[in-house]
Image: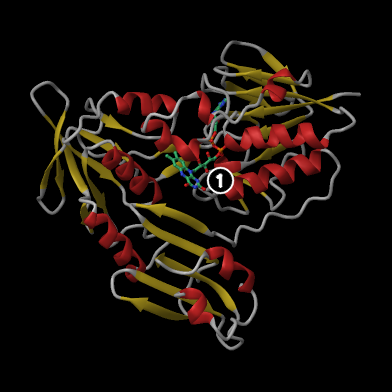
Amino acid sequence: MTRTLVIIGHGMTGHRLADTVRTLDTAGDWHLIVLGEERDPAYDRVHLSAYLRGRGRAELSLVGREFLRDRRVDLYPGQPAVHVDRTARTVLTAAGEEIGYDALALATGSRSFVPPVPGRELRNCFVQRTLDDVDALRAAVHRGRPAVVVGGGLLGLEAAHGLLLLGMRPSIVESAHHLMPAQLDADAARVLQHGAADLGLGLHCGTTVASVDAGPAGAVRSVTLADGTVLDADLVIFAAGIRPRDDLAVSPSLERGERGGFLVDAFCRTADEHVWAVGECAAVLGRCHGLIAPGYRMAESVARQLTGHPAEPFDGTDTSTTLKLLGVHVATFGSAPVRDGEAIDVAFSEGMTRYAKVFLQPGSGILLGGILAGETGSRTALAPHVGRRPPAGLEQLLLP
Ligand SMILES: Cc1cc2nc3c(=O)[nH]c(=O)nc-3n(C[C@H](O)[C@H](O)[C@H](O)COP(=O)(O)OP(=O)(O)OC[C@H]3O[C@@H](n4cnc5c(N)ncnc54)[C@H](O)[C@@H]3O)c2cc1C
C-alpha cells in the first residue's frame, strides 16, 4: 500500500529529499506531499547574490519539469504548515487543510538573525534570505551611495560583494577582531582583508552597531558604531547569523537542541519514529549546520532510510568550505580543533597574498585539516591526505 511522506519546507534540502526519494523509490511505495511557505518552488539560495546582480528568478529554480509532472508528488508552494499533531499523524496547513502522514520530514531551514539594535525596523534595513528579500533590497540600491553590512562572516561578505558589484560603497561591521571568525584565524583573515580593502570595502572589526539612524523621510541615513564612529548609509543589510526555524507548533512537542533546532540523531531521526528533520532546522546530535553540503547529506540519508537503502550516519566533523570572495580564494578542509591542545598547528605564509595552516594530531602527526587563503594549493588536492600523515612535499602542496 502507498504510504504518504509529508515534507514541510520546499527549500534546498526539502527538495533534495523529495527528489532523492523519487529516484530511489522504484517500486512507487511513496506518495509525496511537499508544503512550501514561499511562493517559489525550491531554488538555489546559495546563489541569491547572482539574482541580486540580475540573474532571472527562473534560472535559480531547482525544480525540473519531470518533478512537477511526477504524479507521485503533490507540491503546494505558498502553503505553510501551521501545526503538526503527532498523535493523529496529521499536518494542518495555513489554508485549513489537514493532511495525514506515515512519515514526516521537517525541512524548515533558518531565519536571518537581526540583532536588537535601535532603528533596525527603519525603511531600507534588509536581510538576504529569500528571493523576495532580494527584490526589496534591489529596489533600494543606488550606484555610488554608501551602505553598511552588519556581520563579516560568509553571508556578510557575500552581501557586501554583491553591493560592490552593483556600484555601491559598502562597509562591513564585524564584532570579532577579524572577518570570517568562524572559519579563519587572524592571519588567514588578514589576506582576505587585504583583498577586500583593495576593492574599496570599508572594514570595521572589533566593534558593533549601536544604532541605525533615520534621515528626514524615515529611511536609514547612517549607522552609529559602539566605538562612536558614524557611517553614512543609504541601506543596511543584517547578515549577523542565522537561527534554526524550529518554532512550528508540534504537539506533543519535539525536543530542541541547546541552541535550537529539532533534535535528531546521526540518522536525522527525532524521538518520534515517524518524524525526521533535515537541513538547517535539524540539530544533529545537538548541532545545527549552516551550509548546504551537510544539508544535502542529511536529505540523502533520510531518503535512503525511507526507501529501504542502507544509510551512513551523518558525520558533521568535516566542515570544509571553499569560496572566492572579493577576488580572494579562501578554503578550509577537514576539521579544525575545537579545544586548545587538540592539535599542533603549522603555518606557512608569503606576505599579504597567501597563507596556509594545517592542524596535526599531537603524537601521531596525522593531518586533521587546515585553512587556505590567497593563491594557495587547492582544497581538493589536500583533502585526500586528511586522516593520514602528511606527504613529504606538504609545503609545496600548500603554497605551490
Ligand atoms: C545569501 C546566502 C548565501 C549562501 N551561500 C552559501 C554558500 O556559499 N555555501 C553554502 O554551503 N551555503 C550557503 N548558504 C546556506 C544555504 O543556502 C543553506 O544551507 C540551505 O539553503 C539550507 O537548506 P534548508 O532546506 O535547510 O533551508 P532553506 O533553503 O532555507 O529552506 C527552508 C524552506 O522552508 C520554508 N518553511 C519554513 N517554515 C515552513 C512551514 N511552516 N511550512 C512550509 N514551509 C516552511 C522556508 O520558507 C524555506 O523556503 C547561503 C545562504 C544564503 C541566504
The x and y percentages for residue 367 are 58, 77
The x and y percentages for residue 113 are 38, 40
Quadrant showing the N terminus: top right
Label 1: few (<14), some or many (≥20) within 10 Å?
some
Asked if 66 appears above or below 193 in the picture, the reply is: above
* Residue at 37%, 45% in the rendered image: 158
- Residue 24 can be seen, yes or no: yes
Asked if 86 appears above or below 110 in the picture, the reply is: above
Q: Amino acid at mark 1?
A: Ile
* Residue at 28%, 36% in the rendered image: 166
The x and y percentages for residue 209 are 21, 46
- Per the image, label 1 sits on a secondary structure element best described as helix
* Residue at 56%, 21% in the rendered image: 80
Residue toward you, 33 or 356: 356
The residue tagged 1 is 292
The x and y percentages for residue 150 are 28, 44
Quadrant of residue 324 in the image? bottom left
Asked if the beta carbon under badge 1 is closer than 8 A to the nearest atom of ligand 1, the reply is yes
Quadrant of residue 295 in the image? top right
Horizontal side of residue 340 vs 215, given as left or right: right
Asked if 130 appears above or below 368 in the picture, the reply is: above
Q: How is the image coloured?
A: secondary structure
